[in-house]
Each structure stands twice: as structure tokens, then as C-alpha cells.
Image (cartoon, coloured by chain):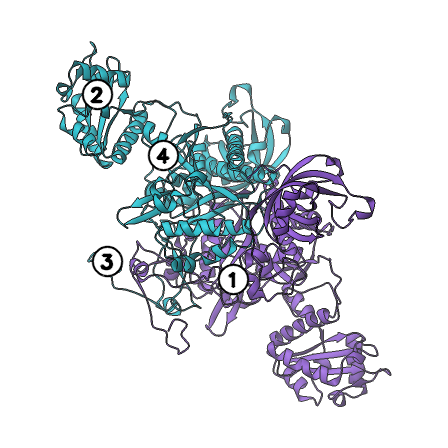
Chain colours: A purple, B cyan
Amino acid sequence: MGQRTHVCGELSEALTGSSVVLQGWVKKRRDLGQVIFIDLRDRSGQVQIVFNGEENPEALRIAEDVRSEYVIEVEGTVLERDEANVNPKISTGRIEVMISAIRVLNAAKGLPFVVEDTAELNEDVRLKYRYLDLRRPAMQETMKLRSRTTKLIRDFLDEQSFMEMETPMLTKSTPEGARDYLVPSRVHHGEFYALPQSPQLFKQLLMVSGFERYFQIARCFRDEDLRADRQPEFTQVDIEASFMPKEELLGMTEKMMQKLVSELRGVEVKAPFKRLTHREAMNRYGSDKPDTRFGMELTDVSDIVKDTDFKVFSGAVKSGGAVKGICVKAEAPNYSRKDLDELSSFAAIYGAKGLAWLKVDEAGALKGPIAKFFDEDKAQAIKDAFQAEPQDILLFAADKLQVVWDVLGALRTKFAKDLKLVEPGTFDFLWVTEFPLLSYDEEEGRYAAEHHPFTRPVREDEHLLTEAPEKVRAEAYDLVLNGYELGGGSQRIFERGLQEDMFAALGFSKEEAYEQFGFLLDAFEYGTPPHGGIALGLDRLVMILADRTNLRDTIAFPKTASAGCLLTNAPSPVEQAKLDELNLSVKEKQSAESKQG
Amino acid sequence: MGQRTHVCGELSEALTGSSVVLQGWVKKRRDLGQVIFIDLRDRSGQVQIVFNGEENPEALRIAEDVRSEYVIEVEGTVLERDEANVNPKISTGRIEVMISAIRVLNAAKGLPFVVEDTAELNEDVRLKYRYLDLRRPAMQETMKLRSRTTKLIRDFLDEQSFMEMETPMLTKSTPEGARDYLVPSRVHHGEFYALPQSPQLFKQLLMVSGFERYFQIARCFRDEDLRADRQPEFTQVDIEASFMPKEELLGMTEKMMQKLVSELRGVEVKAPFKRLTHREAMNRYGSDKPDTRFGMELTDVSDIVKDTDFKVFSGAVKSGGAVKGICVKAEAPNYSRKDLDELSSFAAIYGAKGLAWLKVDEAGALKGPIAKFFDEDKAQAIKDAFQAEPQDILLFAADKLQVVWDVLGALRTKFAKDLKLVEPGTFDFLWVTEFPLLSYDEEEGRYAAEHHPFTRPVREDEHLLTEAPEKVRAEAYDLVLNGYELGGGSQRIFERGLQEDMFAALGFSKEEAYEQFGFLLDAFEYGTPPHGGIALGLDRLVMILADRTNLRDTIAFPKTASAGCLLTNAPSPVEQAKLDELNLSVKEKQSAESKQG
């Protein structure tokens, strides 16, 4: 291999007449007989190279055998193109390179798909041939954007005196949170490590250690059944600071986001970001991560409909639920009765038993199967509540509050997408604050931490922790971007007593709490500074910054929905000898559809 | 909590008269009755704060109860100290802060040890209370140095157009290399992921993808029995580049090392670094990671002694081994016969059956139990070979070549340490090149890759791969610093045929090779660029840069020699329900000393 003198993308008229050595991939080849043109591609871009059979018959002969995605090395001279042949679409479009010598470094057989963004590909094929999929321009750009994102974050936090520190991957399994990935120990019989769901405990211990400003771009793991926007391993920007009041932490996070959006997308975002309390977010948008780039807020009509004859509505209110709706402006002519009835099955995903709707006709009258239940006064009151106008559609959910929120929150998002209510290229940040500290888990019959057990209660609610845990608000904040939860943070408990109360509220006995978290409780007695922090999902951040909708497109080697890798075939069976060393045996599968027989 | 206005370390005369709010830890407290002095510490340094009972009795009263490592917030005024009270040892020694108000943010009970470097501590105690151990100044400095090291590396590689990219942690177990940590899959019955021993395959696939310049500061895992300088999880600076000839990669690595040593230690290291072939390193130093900061090279006396009556020497040569020695200059008077005889047990660790020695007396005569075997000519020849002078000690190993190397290599290092032959603060870099590609594993009865199976053979040795595998030299290079292996790299195989030959040399059938590495073999057929890379052990690099000798001191939360965490008690037993989900059961322990009964 010779020594490359330039990368393709940096060639320009300034180099006219220069001799260059290039190395890269054959992107396209046009064979005109005595002249062959090749678009040569490398990491920096592409350039047109020319083989002329009269001047260099030997080079032309080799170029004749070259095909797409061959890796070649060429030597030649930079020439300016005739004005007529200038290609303004590429940065090197004013020049071409006349080739005197070519060497094939590695041949390529026919590819399973062309390396272009235009190719419509099944995702399984993309994942199996990920190394080719990643050659496609949009994937190259996304990976570059991801790399630039982490560099910008690191530089920003370094300027703020944060130290990047590493925490262990082989950690202790704890009973809280999602399901752990376990790692059997060979040395300690029958014992297991857990892969971290986050570096939470370690970053707090680093605060106890006095480092004051820690961050880490950390790999985290959750063994959960996957949804489209989850991966078994994911990356988070993990930040923790001592002696930093909440407002300072939020302000710093805002500056970091402003910098990212500005540098990567050229958009200037205003700060401070909007804020909503959790309660307000639910009431107005039916979501704790609302997309506030459009309106269509939830309107409560419980009071109006509670005494009507429509039992679905009045019954929901009487049994402690609510009736709320959204108003879809001016779309009545575009949605048939059938269209609207079909929304019921969408609503059912979110737990609704049905979805009621009304149209406002041209004359301002309410129309639809349930219109008959409302007399003129009620109809007017409903229209007033929604500020409804002719041709609007009103959609109602009547159920327990949580179901009403879930259904309407999801419907809002669906309509925004269907009706293209959102202007592309906007970055709408929002803080959601005052989350409940605990939520009651009906299945488990106990309270669970809404964020995690280390989140501080709001000072004035601390006394409620033992009496009325569900009323305690947390000193927690989620950062939302365009309707996605980017991440969450909180001020932490740093007093042993309060932390013990918290564990008690979660149903731990004193012994259980100490068994699991004794090292933290002990640490809190040796001079622990007030501290708080935030964790941001890097994969999701990159997804939004890159205008992508699939989380897997932001990860070089992602897993499928069943947590497999189609490229390497992980996970895979291992030899019995390896399991013997770990003192493990695999139990027979119970069900018939065993994968391994 | 109020808003801190300054950190301790930034206070100076320039702020005299200013009102400041500080937050930090009580480092030391001197109670003089009506006046109390406290050294307040935060991440930036320390400052003396003063409580005066006449001016602020309330503050003094609170300060009376404060103890070491309390976390406090204070408000006060910066005052210049009298010239007599200036403390030149600390940066804030010309000022003190007169306190008007104090608040205890978190109390501290008596610590298990004082937070000073001077404390001589059992390492188990340090690891159990790691969050306190990390408060000690030297640990703070080491962690800061580690963080600066990674920042400098990232900045350097970014300037060289390298992209940091993440590769999976849940990967496929492969039969090569060290023992994998396994992670059972819940979804795929009886199947396992492996934690990566390195991102080797993925970084090569990223080269196939055309990213050309990748790096990652990557966590890696090896389930090996631990030695003092190994950890089950460790961090490596992982670099891979396409179209970059070996010399360019080595040169770039040298620049990166120069930058680190210069910025972190103020030492300018010369480049290009020295180079030794593997063969030369073994012959001259008995080690593939020789410490070349001192001489004491190995001298071969096989030819001189092969016909003498000393059967240990002549026998070793006759059975295909060698007799080599080292010369310890001018130390004869300091080592008694007993001292030298005792070195035999040191040599035994490295496989030697004994260790022969000779002293050169003041008159130049050889002395010692074996001196009688050498007539005057032989004695002179031996002295000439070592350029021995009166009072020198000669130490000999006579055995198979590998044993001779191991023994004398270790002895060199031992004498260098005992005799303080090495000047502290020197950074002696060295490349060791032309490693053998394969070594014969007698236990397994087959060849194993010296580096890994993806390393290229030297071009002119390629034809030997099938005929005489042990003779093939690898296009591989190790970077050695002060006798430690910092890391290793190589040019990679990028042709399917050659890679298949390599797998065959390792004893894989064609089917086995495809089963394990089919995705890589396939990838090599779609236009793979020539590529190579290097991986550097970050923990070890930091250890040397920080003048430490214990690898654990460079890791915030390390594991013990039995791969446990004394702080969190990982690993630990998990509930049976969790194992049921994984379809696993733990087998009864065979031996009596079961930990779990």
C-alpha cells in the first residue's frame, strides 16, 4: 500500500496540476470504452477520477475490471473540469483526477443492496449486513453526528470543571428498578454480578468522595421486553454535582442543549426552557412528556356532562373518573363516521373502552351518535369549553383519570403526526417538574419510586413521607424534547435518616434496606455534601438531532426487538464446559416451541 | 443551601475585603477558645477560615461542635494575613476568611481512618470505605490525572480526524483468547452473551463500513485469575485506522504519548521511540516488555561453557537449551554467599532448577562454588563476555531458552529495583516488533495466536503459514513503557483467503471458522480496506503517569484479587425467581468449603 496524499473531499481547484494518491471505494463507474469515469469515495467525500485509454492503457485495463465497492488506490493529476462539466452538487465538482496508475486493494463481490439512502431495505437485512448498511450516506452522517455530539458534551462539561470518571460494569444486583442483566461469578459459587442500569449509586459515592463534579458517558443495561424506542444496552450522559442548587443544574443543562442544537443543527434555542409541573402536564396534555409544539390541549367537560343521560359520561364522573376531550380544528369534512369510529381501537391500546366523538357542523350544531344526549345549553357549554367552531371534531375519553390522560395524550400525538401539525426542524425543550415521589404499585401492593429511591422529597412535603406517601412531590425534573423524554434528574437524599424513611416507605424493613444499601447509608454519615444530578439518554438525543425516528439508526450495532444481534448471532449457546466452570446448568424448556429442541 | 460564590482554591489577596460564601469539608480544626481556625477543603484546594468569638459569638458556638469531615457552608470576608502568619505551602496561604455565619450541611461521625496520604492503611479497609479513601489527596490527584488523560487522548485523536464510536457490550462468545464473562439471555433459552474482551471484531467491521478512523475508550472484560496488575474489567484506548501504513500509526501513537507525558508530567520525550524486534528483546533482556532504563543485558556464554565439566551448564547446551547470565556491577561486597544462594528460590518462580553465580574478586579471579569448573582460559573468556571487572557478580541460568529468558528477565528487574538503578520520573518508551504470529500451546496441542487471530503475517512470511507456522512473524507491535506493556497493535488481515488460512493454522475446520466468524469472512468480500490499529491499557498508562505501582489505585472502584467489590459486596446471591426467568440453576458445590452451604 502506498501513502495516501489526500482524502477525496479536500480536493479542489487549488490543487490543479498536483499529483495525488487517493484510496477509497468505487461508488459508481461509467464505462465509455476508451474512457472510464469512477466516483471515488472515502470518509471525507467523493471525487471523479478519469481513466483515459489513449494515455494510460494499462490503468484503463485494470479499471475495466473494477466494480462497485472495490477498494482501490490511484495516482493521478488534478485537472480543472470544463465549465460545461462542472457538478455543483458535490464539493469537488469543479475538478477531476486524471489517473496514471491504479491498484486494487480489495475486490468486492456483488452486494446484497446498493450503498445508497434511496434503497428501501428490510431492517433485518440491514442489521445482518450492518457493515454495509453503515456505508450508506445517511448512516455515515448519523454516526458522525453522534460522535460530534459526545465530543461537544465532553468539551462543554470539561469547561464547567466536570471530571469524566468511570464506574464499574460488574456491580451488585439490587431489588429496585427494572430487571438486571446478571453475570455469573466463576470464583464465588452461586453468586452473580449485575450490569448497571445506571451508575446512580457510584456517582453518589463519588460525591461523598468530594469530587463534586462528575460526568460519564456511560453504557447502561435493562433486561426488559423491548419496545421500538428501547435497547437492552443504551448510553446515557450521566451527570452529578455537589453544592449545585437545582436552578444552577437546570441552567447548565439548558446551556449544554443550546450548544448542541446550535452547533449541530444551526438552530438557536431560547432559554430558560418552559416548565410544567407534572400535574399540569397531565391535565393539559395527558402526558408527562408532552409535545408542546402544537396545541390541542385536553379540555375537562366532567362538570358539564356529569348529569346528562349519556351513561358512559355521567357514570365515569360519578365513579371518580373524568370526561375530557380534545378538539381537532377544521377537520370534520376529512374524517368520516367510519374513520372516527375506528379511532376506538387506537384508544383501546391505551385502555379505553371506547372513544366518543362529536362533529360541529357548518351551522355550529353538534352532530354524531351521542349528540342527542346534549340539550341546547349543554351543547353550547361543550362548544364553549373547547372554543369549538364549525367543522371541528371533538373527541372524548371518559374513564379513570390515568386512562383518560393516556388515551387523549396518545390521540393528540397521533393527530399531530397525521395532520402534520409540527414544523420540522424545531427543537422544543420543556422541563416537567414536581413529579410524585412515589406511585402505588397495585400489582405488588406497595409503593414504588417514581424516579428512584434516592430522589429527595420537596422540603415542605418531607413530613408526609410516612403519613401520606402518595402526596409527596419529588425534587425531580425531566427534560422533554419534542415529546420525547430526554432524561431526568433530581436532587438527592444525603441524610441517613431521610434515606431510611424513604426505604421504609418503599416497604423495606430496616434490615433489608441495610443489607442492600448499607454502604450508602454508612457513607451518608461521614460528611456527604448536598448533591443532585441528571441523566440524559444519548441514543434518543442523537435520534432527534439527526431527524431520525428509529433509535436503532443511532447505534452502530443495535439489537433487535428480541435483544439479538443479527450480525454476530449473539446470544448463542456455549459449551457445557464453560457452564460447568460457573456451576450453572440450563433447565429444560417447559414449552413446546423450544428453540434448541 | 445558599449559593456558593467561590471555591476555596481560587481565593487570593486579589479578593481581600470581598464577602464570600464557601462550601466544603472541615479538614482540620484548631480550637483556641475564643478563636477557632478551620482548614476548609473543597475540590479546588483549601483555605483557612477563622471564627472570632468576640465578633461573632453565634458562629463560634456552632464551630465549637464541628468536627473533621463535617460538610459546612460559611459566609465571611477575605482578609490578608500578617506577614508572620503567611503559609507558603498552600496557594491560599496569604489570606484567611473571617466568618460571620456558618451552617452545618451534613455532620460526620468519627472516620475509620484520617483522610491523609500519610495514613498507612490495609487495602481491604481502603476498598470497603472507598468513598473515604478517594478523599485522600493522592487519590484525588490520581483520579484527576486519569480524567485529564482521557480528555487529552480524546482531544488528540479528534484533531487527527478520529471518531469515537461505541460498540456493543452484549456480544458473542468466541473460542479464542481469555475466558469470557457470560451473560445469560432471558429471551433466548440456554443462550448467552459475552462481555467483550476487546472491541476487536466490531472495530474491524467499522473499517469495513468506511469510517476509516475509529477510537473508543472502551471497557473490556476478562474472567481470569487475577494477578496484582490485572482487573476483571479494565479500560483500553482502542484505535483502528484504514489506509494508514504501520509507520504512520506508530508515529501518531508516539505523538500522543509525547503529548500526555509533556502535559501531565512536564517531561519531553524524544521520538521516534526505540525499537527492538521480539527476538532481540528476548535475547538482550529476557523479556518481551523489557525495561531499558538500565543495562544489565543478558550475555550468552553457551559456547564458552558447553564443554566444561559443570554438567548443569554443558547439559543445558547439549539438550538444546542455553546458558546465559547477567552481570551485576560492583556489588560483590554487598551480597554474601547466602544472599546469592537465596536467589535460587526467586529463580524457581520462573521455572529454574537453580541459579549459578560467580563473583569477581579484587584481583580479578572468579570465586564461588562453581569457579572450580573453569580453567584460566574459560574464566577469562567468561569475564570478557561480560566485560566483568573486580567486585562484579555474575548470575547464570542454564535451561531451555524460555526459562533462561524468564529467569534472567525477572532477575534484571529485581536487581534494578533493589539497587535503585532507575532514575525516577523517566519515561522510557520502546516498540517491540516482529512478534511470532503463533505460538504452540503444548497443553492444547495446537497453535494459538500470539496477539489475536486477526493479526497479519509479515508479507514475506505469508507462505510459511501452512508449512511452518511457528516461523511466521506477525505485523504486530507492542508499546512498552518502563518495563510495562502499555498495549499492542497490528496490521490486520483483510482478505478472506488469508483469514481462512489463519483460522486453519489455529486448528479450526472451515465449518467451525465460518460458524464463529462467518460475518467477518463475508464482510471481507465486500470491499474491505487495509487497516490496522492499536489498543493501549488506560489503567496501566495512568498508573505509570501517576507514579503509582498498584493498578487498583488508578480505578475509582476496583475489584479485589478474587474479583469482588468490598464496598458493595458484589457479586452476591440472587433470588431463585430471577434465575428461573433465565432458565438457570446453580449446581451444588462439590467441595466442602462451600461459601453458601
- Camera-side residue of B21 and A289: A289
Dot 3: what SS? loop
If you read the primary sequence from the N terminus, does the residue marked by circle 4 or circle 3 appear first?
Answer: 4
Provide the residue designation for mark 3: B594
If you read the primary sequence from the N terminus, does the residue marked by circle 2 or circle 3 appear first?
Answer: 2
Counting other residues with Cα less than 10 Å from the Cα at mark 2, is it few (<14), some (14-19), or many (20 or more)? few
Counting other residues with Cα less than 10 Å from the Cα at mark 4, is it few (<14), some (14-19), or many (20 or more)? many
Drawn side of residue A375 relative to residue B286, left or right: right
Provide the residue designation for mark 2: B335
Taking the view exactly as shown, the residue that stands out farthest to the top is: B363
Drawn side of residue B445 relative to residue B473, left or right: left
Provide the residue designation for mark 1: A559
The chain letter under disc 3 is B
The chain letter under disc 1 is A
Q: From mark 4 to mark 3, how far is it between C-alphas?
A: 40 Å
**Looking at the picture, which amino acid does disc 3 mark?**
Ser
Q: Do labels 4 and 3 share a chain?
A: yes
Dot 1: what SS? loop
Q: Are marks 2 and 1 on the same chain?
A: no
